[in-house]
Every structure is written in C-alpha cells, then in structure tokens.
Amino acid sequence: MFLKWLNSQRIAASLFNRKPVTVLLLIVLFCAGAAAQADPAANTNSNTAPSPLPTPTPIPVASVLSEAEAATARLKNIRASLEDTSAVAPIDNGLPALRQDIDTREAEARRILSENPSFDDLRSVEQDWEPISQTLARWTRTLRDRSSAREKEFAELSQMADTWSKTLASLKGTSPPNQTENLVSIDSVPDEVLKKINEVIADIKATIQQAEENQKRLLSLQSRVTSLESRVNASLADTSSERGRVFSGIFLRDNRPIWSVLDTSSVTGDNKEAGASFSTQTSELRTYAAARTDRFLIHGLLFLVVTGLLFWARSFIRPHVKAEPKLETAAQIFAKPVVTALVISIFMSAWLYPQAPTLLRSLIGLAGIVPAVILLRQLVSSSFHLLLNAMVIFFFIDRIRDVFPEHSVVGRLLFLAEMAAAVLFLFWVLRSRSFAASVEAGHSRTVDSLKKAIPFIIGVFGFAFFAQLVGYVNLANLVGNGVLASSYAALVIYASVRIFQGMAIFALRMRPLSLIPVVRNNRPAIRETVFRFIRWLAVAIWILIVLNLFAVRQYIFEQIIALTSWSVSIGSVDLSIGDVLIFIITLWIAVMISRFLQFVLREELYPRWSVGTGASYAISTTLHYAVIVIGFLIAVGALGVDFTKFAIVAGAIGVGIGFGLQTIINNFVSGLILLFERPVKVGDTIQINEHTGSLKEIGLRASVLRKVDGSDVIVPNSMLVSEEVVNWSLSDTRRRIDIQVGVAYGNDPKQVMDILYNIASTKDDILAEPAPNVLFSNLGESSIDFELRVWVEDPDKVVSLRSEMVTDIYDSLNEAGIELPFPQRDIHLRSIDETTLRGLRSEK
C-alpha cells in the first residue's frame, strides 16, 4: 500500500466510485449466485453422503496374479502406515510428564481460586493453562485424524478380504447361486494361483489384526488425552467463572480499611509470607530453567546473533550518516547494539518461555524496560528523560510489591505509597515551571498533549489510592496496576517502533533493496508506508495488552464474535455481519493488490520494457478488472454462495441484462475493443465530430476527452468504435500547420513566396524533413492567394507556433511594402434619378 500509488492511482478505485454500471453488474451477478443458493432444489445434492464402496466380486482367474501383486503392495503400504509412529510417539512419550504437570498446576489453581484471587492471579492461571490446552487440542486433532485413517483402512481391508474370499470360493465351487456362471473347475487352476490367493488372504488377516491392535492403542491414547483435556477445560471454566464472580463483585469491598488492619503482627506475618513467597518463586524458576534449558540457550544464541548483526551493520551505516546528517538520530539504535538486541530479543520471550513463572516474567520485564529507557534517552528530547527515569523507579517498586500478596498489609501499604508518589510526581510535572522551560521547541505539541492527559491519570491514581485505602483491594489493583503496566508496555513498544523504523530507514538505503529501481525511485513513499504499518501494528498490540491488563479482552472478544455471528435469513441463505465484513475486506484486499500490481508495473516493468502509454494503460486496466473480478468471486464464495448453479441463473438474468441494458453492454464491449485493438490510445490527440483534444481515459462505459480549452468531454465508447474518428497521433505525433496568405494584385508572387519560406526556415520547432513548402494556391477575387505548409513534432505547440508565424508574416509583408488586399467591387448603375446625379456631380 505504498503512499505514492495509494494517492495517484485512481484506476483501481474507479470501479467503485466512478463506475456505477459496473457495480450494478456485480450486484446482479451476486444476486444470481444468491438465488442459486436459495433454490432448495439446487442444494439437494450438495450435502449428499459419500457413495458406499462397491460390492466385492470374485476376481477373474486371468487377473488373479496381477491383482495379487497390487494387493500385496497395498497391504505393505498399510502396514507401513500402521508402523509409522512419528505422530503418535511424541504424544505417548510426553503424556506422563504432561499429566504430572497438570496435577501440579491443577492443585495450584485450586489453591489460588480458593484464596480470593485478584485479576492478576486469574490471568496468571489462564496463561499457565493456555499452552497446555493448545497442546492437548493439537494432540486430539492428531489422534482423531489417525483414527479416521484407521477406519478407512479397516473398510478397505474388509473389502479386500471379501473379494479374495469370494475369489477362492468361486474356484472351489462354493460361490452363491447368482455367481455360478463364473465357476471354474479347481482342477484347471494352477497350484501357484491357489497358493497366491491363500497367501494374500493370510496377509490380509494379519494386517487386519495389526490394524485392530493399532486402533486399540490409538483409542486408549485418545481416551487418556481426552481425560486430561477435560480436566484442563474444567479448570479453565472454573477460572472463567471465578473471573466473572470477581468482575461482578469488583465494586464490592473485599477487605477491611487499611487503618483497621495495621498492627505489628500483621506486618511480621507478611514479611515471613513474603520471604516464603520469594523462596517459592526462586524454586519455581530453578525448576523451570532446568526443564527448559534449551529455551534459555536459544534465547542467548538469538541475542548474540542480533548483537553481531547490529555491530556488522553499524560499519555500513556510518557512510550514510556522514552523507545525510539528518540520519544521526535513526543511527542511534546501532550505536548501542547490546541494548537494541535486548529489546528485540524480548519479543521472542512469549514463544520461548510458555507458562513462565512469576519471577521469570518479572526478569523479562526488567530486561525489556531498562534497555528501552536507555535507548530512548538517545532518541528523544532530554526534556523527557525525567519521565523515563520515573517509570523505571515505579517498575522496580512494582516488582517489590510482587513479593507480597495483594491483600497483605505490606502489599497494600506499598501500593498506597506508589499511588501517592505517582500523583505527586505527575502534579509536579503539570505545575513545574522548570520542566516547562526545559521543553524544546520541536516537542511542545507532545508536552501539551501529555499535560492534557495528566489530570486524567492523576484522577485514576487518586481513585485507586482511595479504593485501596477503604478496602476495595481488587478494584484498586485492577485500576492502578493496569495503568502502570499499560505505561510500561507503551514504553517498550515505542522503543521497538523506533528500532524497527530505524532499521527500515537504512534497509531502504542498503543492498539489496537499494538496487531495486522501484525502491530507489520511491524511497520516501515506501518509508512512510512502512512507518504507518509499524505504527498501526504497535497500536494494535498495545490495545490488546491493555484489554488483557484490565481483564476485559475475553469479554470484548466474545461480544465481537456474538455481534459478527448475528445473521439474517433470506430464504435459505443466511447472511451474518461477519460474512459481510469478510466480503468487504476481501474486496478491499483485491483493490489493494490491484493498486500494488499497477504500481510495480508502472515503476518497475514499463520503463524497463519501454512500453508505450496506450499499451501500458491497456495492460494495467485489464489487470485491474481481472483482479477485481477474482476478488469479487472469492468474496462471494466467502459468503457461502453455491457456485454450482451460478452459471445457469446468471445466464437467465443475462438475457434480461441484454434487453434492458443494450446501450451499456454495447459501450462495455466497445471499451474492450478499444483496450485490445487500440485504434485510439490514452494520450492520443483525436477529433470526433466537433470535439478535438487528448484522450485521457478509456473506461468501461465511456472515455474522457480533454479539449484544448481544458474542458472534458464524456464520449461513449461505442462512438469511438462506430463513428468516424480522426486520430492525429495514431502513427506518429507530427502535425502539419497550414497558413493561407493573400496579397493584393500587382505584387511579385516570387517575393511573397521567398518571404514565407524564410519565415518558416527560421523557426526551430519546425521540422526540416518534411521541409516547409510554399504554394501559389489561387487567384482570388481580390487577392492572389498563397499557402504555407510546415510540420512540427510536438502537437502541443501547434496553436502557439501558428500564432507566432502569422505575426511574423504580417510584419514581414508590411516591411516589404506588400499590400494586403481588402474586398473590391465594381458597381454598374442601370438608372439614376436627376437629383442623385446632380449631387454626385457637385461632389466631384
């Protein structure tokens, strides 16, 4: 979605905002497909069950040996499939350890749910169960697929057994009465054939027995996996139920006011509990690290690789920075490669460390926010350094609070102290003159926006402080911790945005991207598009994090799913909001793909292939229509329209279109003729009837002709095909200028012709070949007439050059004393009265 072609390409968007006829045709076709789906008779065969296997029949004696070889090969493949344990063995081997892990986490989850959990506790429980649930779901799908494959093999083996049994019975003369015509005397059958049949039957029985044993193991394993999956789903359901209970009681007091629980014994007990909690978290981290040593090694290796790449890239970036000093700020991400690599490697932590314990999550957060602050101090104005430092301090306070339970006295006191410190600090930022004076001129808008948000944040922290103070612990922690954690996430995400933007800046200036002409010629537009994508992605990630922190992501997603699932029935067709959204998104993607392809053609391929303007327009337009039609068909398919009867109904409606829209269809077909036959092309100078101008666009229904005076004439395509059209630039762009000149009788014709020729010869814009030509064209009533003919290469200069030459001709004839004529008439009077005659004589 490059900026240049997003702004300049009007062709792709014209299908929707300038071609109502096209939209009408698409809607008609869509209605045809919907009608086909709505026809009950059309769908009677859409969901028919698969046809049963054919009834086994004895194999002819002549084909027994060849069929036996084929059956043996097939049985060998089936046994190989039964012996293949690559998909099942990991499940069987990993099930005991996973069961033990589930037992431990199930007990821990029950303990947490029984102790008045907070939203953070419930979120931690759900995060612990989520990867286990995904693993069990994946195992269930694998086992189900394997079991389905075994059932198909059972059916195939059963049919093979029946076939060969009937074959043997027919040779022994024990076939059913309806098959007596195929009986062959057993004496005439070679022993090798009978032996081969018995071997195949024995092989089939052995394979069936092996398949039965394999199926038993699969079903046993599937039962154990399903049992564990049920336990995990039950625990998740209990957690979700507890979340609903906590959420519904969020505005209920869940603890006593802070002043009523302050005593020495409570603090001492909290300290002991904190020590035990920290020891437990340390033990969990050691156990987790011992079980997943490979993950830590991968993380370390990834960090070293990224650091090495940044060190390597730094040497290539210095020349670009020297050439363009404005890149100095973006180059700061390479000036501290270790810090930048830490921030980048943090993004892999969610994948590397599933079910991470609390202490490891705190260390990962520390490894993300501290390097982010160090990096941002080099990228942002010094006015914001104080804010960055304050966020690091608050982050460390949060990690200290993690050691104490949220409902403990010490934990609540630390929370109150943190909220009070945050309110006082933000109030100082809002009122401090020294902070306002330190703001640089280029960052005044950012600071103004920040100061507008600070009163709201102060109100949130103040609300959390008083809620904690009077005993609304869960509500206070949800609001206060949510805002703080959202700030930390925004800080790390913003640092990541600056890192990836800096990488994009230099990637577009370095090989191999700098060698691509389309990148080299459109670097600013591509850079802005990449920046926009990074920003939108960062905002989306931050919103998801915030929704999760405030414990509303699952609820909002459920509401969105419920909204998009709402449907309306039209006959037998069900259209939901989700289907409509998919339809719109699919069309939007088709338009974006069309614009991108046209951009690549225009910027990369057409210049390389030296494609003319008319040919390039025809290719781009045809490609655009093809992509839009394909996208429309895919979008209609996403709505669930049955295409099996689409052609029939569309053909019936097409008859109506042919009668009702004859003119439109005529213009549409004419437009296709113009695009492919190209009697006129975009950019040609044409004349049709009294209109002369440059052809600017060939659309589906009509074309646009730009006249010399700047007006646009909408010409139906059928007129350009069926009527007489003068194309001034079909073979070439040269134009001839004809200037008629008349002089009075008595002047020397050769002198006039020399003057005209000399004037034409002195003009640089006049072509030397064909050479200027002066003709003595006529003996007129009042003048002797000449015609000057010259050729020019640029049609746009015809009017101005003609005016210039006429002016020079007039001046040259005057200087030469050549009289320009005026109309002369001889009057012969047949009769005149005496009074008029006397008047004429007196005047004489």
Image: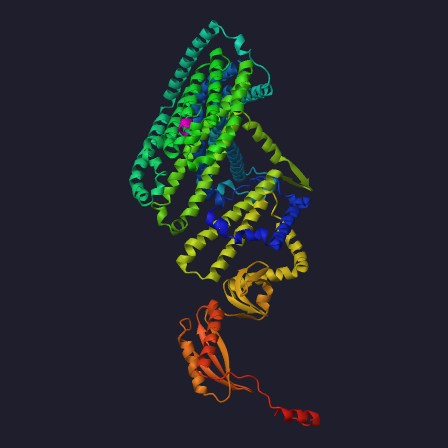
Q: Name the residue at 36% across, 38% down.
A: 329
Assess whether residue 33 is covered by the magenta stretch: no
Residue pushed farthest front?
A: 842
- Residue 143 seen in this snapshot: no
- Residue 519: x and y, percent? 40, 49
Towards the viewer: 821 or 357? 821
Question: How is the rendered protein coloured?
Answer: rainbow
Q: Tell me: 71 left or right of 25.
A: left
Residue pushed farthest top?
A: 265
Towards the viewer: 703 or 158? 703
Quadrant into which the C terminus falls? bottom right
Assess whether residue 385 is covered by the magenta stretch: yes
Towards the viewer: 735 or 155? 735
- Residue 660: x and y, percent? 68, 58
- Residue 64: x and y, percent? 48, 42
- Residue 508: x and y, percent? 37, 45
Q: Give the residues in magenta.
A: 384-388
Check the image and report above or below for 762 versus 638.
below
Quarter of the image where one finds residue 764 = bottom left
Towards the viewer: 748 or 108? 748
Number of numbered markers: 0
**Magenta segment, principal secondary structure?**
helix
Check the image and report above or below for 390 versus 58.
above
- Residue 8 seen in this snapshot: yes
